[in-house]
Every structure is written in C-alpha cells, then in structure tokens.
Image (spheres, rainbow, N blue to C red):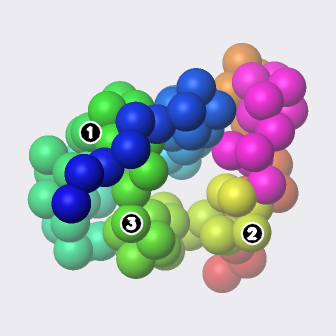
Amino acid sequence: MVRLPLTPEEVERGQRLGALLRRARGERSMLVTALAAGVSPETLRKIESGRVATPAFPTIAAIADVLGLSLDAVWSEINQPDGGAELARSGRTAGVRLAS
C-alpha cells in the first residue's frame, strides 16, 4: 500500500501537536511518559518533533491521558494555527488540562 504524501496543513498540524505534547509533558521524563502511555520513547520523540505528523488515534489518546489532556482540547488547539501558536509562545495550556 502506497501512502500519500502529507499536505502542508497536515505537517503543520503535526508540528502543533508535538509542541502541545512537549509543553504538557513539561519537566517529566520522555521515557517515563512514553512507558506510562504504552508507547515507545522513540514514538513519543517522533511525535513531539513533528516527524510523525499523523499518529494513530489510540497513540494520541494514550499520551493525552497520561498528560491529563482533554482530547477535545488537543483537537481544538492543533487545528487553530493562530491560537495554538499564541498558546505555544505564552507557555500556557489553559483549558487543556482535565480536572482531577
């Protein structure tokens, strides 16, 4: 099966996803975060760096769960080029964390 090349929008969305996950992970170890999510550290590294721009939904769901992120908020942020960039610059993830 041949995989179609990603569109520029998909690449950009993947970069926003990676930035969001890096911010949410903060000072947590990539290794501990990945293992808690049941993914390899290499997979998490590739997603965070934007090298995997379209990761599988279960992978993102597991990582988001470990980081306490709402999937609705993740989707909303990665699909807002201007809003996501503003949050990235400010270092805020307001409205992204789930209540415990």
Residue 74 place in picture, x, y as percent? 67, 57
Q: Is residue 42 visible?
A: yes
**Which label is found at residue 72?**
2
Is 35 above or below relative to 48?
Answer: below
Residue 28 place in picture, x, y as percent? 34, 47
| Between 20 and 24, the one nearer to me in the picture | 20
Q: What residue do we see at 64% from left, 32% from top?
A: 9
Instruction: Say left or right for 78 vs 81.
Output: left
Residue type at mark 2? Asp
Which image quarter is the C terminus in?
Answer: bottom right
Secondary structure at numbered mark 3? loop
Residue type at mark 3? Ala
In this view, the residue farthest toward the top is: 89
| Between 49 and 54, the one nearer to me in the picture | 54
The residue indicated by pointer 3 is 56
Secondary structure at numbered mark 2? helix
Is 24 above or below relative to 62?
Answer: above
Residue type at mark 1? Lys
Residue 89 place in picture, x, y as percent? 72, 18
The residue indicated by pointer 1 is 46
| Between 14 and 19, the one nearer to me in the picture | 14
Secondary structure at numbered mark 1? helix
Residue 45 place in picture, x, y as percent? 25, 40
N-terminal of the two: label 2 or label 1?
A: 1
First to last magenta residue range = 76-86
